[in-house]
Amino acid sequence: MGFFLGIDGGGTGCRAAVADASGRVLGEGAAGPANIASDLAGARDNILAAATQALTRAVGAGAVAAELPALSAGLGLAGANAAGKASALRRALPFARIKLETDAIAAVKGALGDRDGIVAALGTGSVFAAQVGGRIRQVGGWGLVLGDEGSGAWLGREVLRQALLAADGFRAGTPLLHAVLQSHGGAEGVIAFSLAARPADFARLAPEVLAADDPIAHELIAIATADVARAIHLLQHDPPLPVTFIGGLGPSYAVRLGSRWEIRPAQGSALDGALILAREAA
């Protein structure tokens, strides 16, 4: 059946893996962001770069041109739920067979396998999904403009928004807000940054918020944690489903919410889930 390509793409970067018919991974690759809603052309280029890198490591540079268009590809991508984007990307990719889903679907398949449970994927963006009896229900994943509560991008955007409110005098300043304003060159610098910033750019501020012993950091983390808990509660069943936290911020929320539900580690990664999608495509 040839080779299978899995792509896990989000707002920070994308990863690729090429496996043989037995499921053995032969090569891996990585490239930049692959959110097809915010940058379709850039996502396509990064997907192809990561795929080429993985395939080169699997079969050698001389065979890439012949093998690339013969691949069965499974793609779990941020932004795949934006109207028209998935169809446009399929037309732009050379692979023989493609199954394209949101990054949440790939994450669920990788993290849970065939088990029932809830996956909370929290990185640059945020998305949640439950699997019960093989059926998957997703909530969230609407992007930073309309959602992504609890995500790194949300935390970064919110600390900048609060810094501007402090600069205007609508709220008291804090050491973290002063530091954020100073590092961006004042309120004007924050505005200039925001005009060109992508979700991954906002998300780079999240570690600063999470590490700060500061009133605004505590406030934002409390709001974010409540939003994450509300999404999980919406997906819960009777009896309660175990919850698996994944993504760069997943462990932080697992600590904060571990007393509410049973927490289970991921069985595999979103890249493993993308390889499952590749087999389904074949």
Image: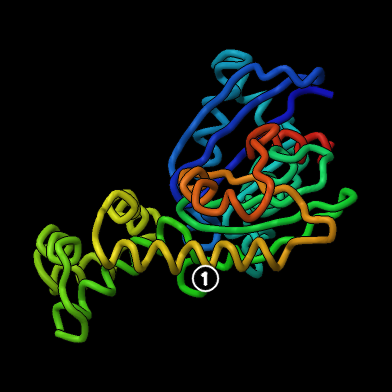
Q: Is residue 129 left or right of residue 79?
A: right
Q: Residues within 10 Å of mark 1 (few under 14, many from 20)?
A: some
Total number of numbered discs in the rendering: 1
Which residue is nearer to you in this view: 204 or 51? Answer: 204
Residue at the image position 9 percent from the left and 64 percent from the top:
185
Q: Is residue 266 left or right of residue 57?
A: right
Q: Position of residue 38 (x, y in %)?
A: 48, 62
Q: Position of residue 89 (x, y in %)?
A: 62, 54
Which residue is farthest right? 133
Residue at the image position 41 percent from the left and 55 percent from the top:
152
Which residue is nearer to you in this view: 207 or 48? Answer: 207
Q: Report whether residue 264 is seen.
A: yes
- Amino acid type of the residue tagged 1 in the rendering: Gly
Quarter of the view holding residue 232: bottom right
Please name the residue that numbered disc 1 is placed on.
Answer: 147
Q: Position of residue 11 (x, y in %)?
A: 47, 52
Q: Quadrant of the N terminus?
A: top right
Residue at the image position 24 percent from the left and 60 percent from the top:
214
Q: Is residue 266 above or below residue 161?
A: above
Q: Is residue 121 left or right of residue 275?
A: left
Q: Position of residue 121 (x, y in %)?
A: 58, 51
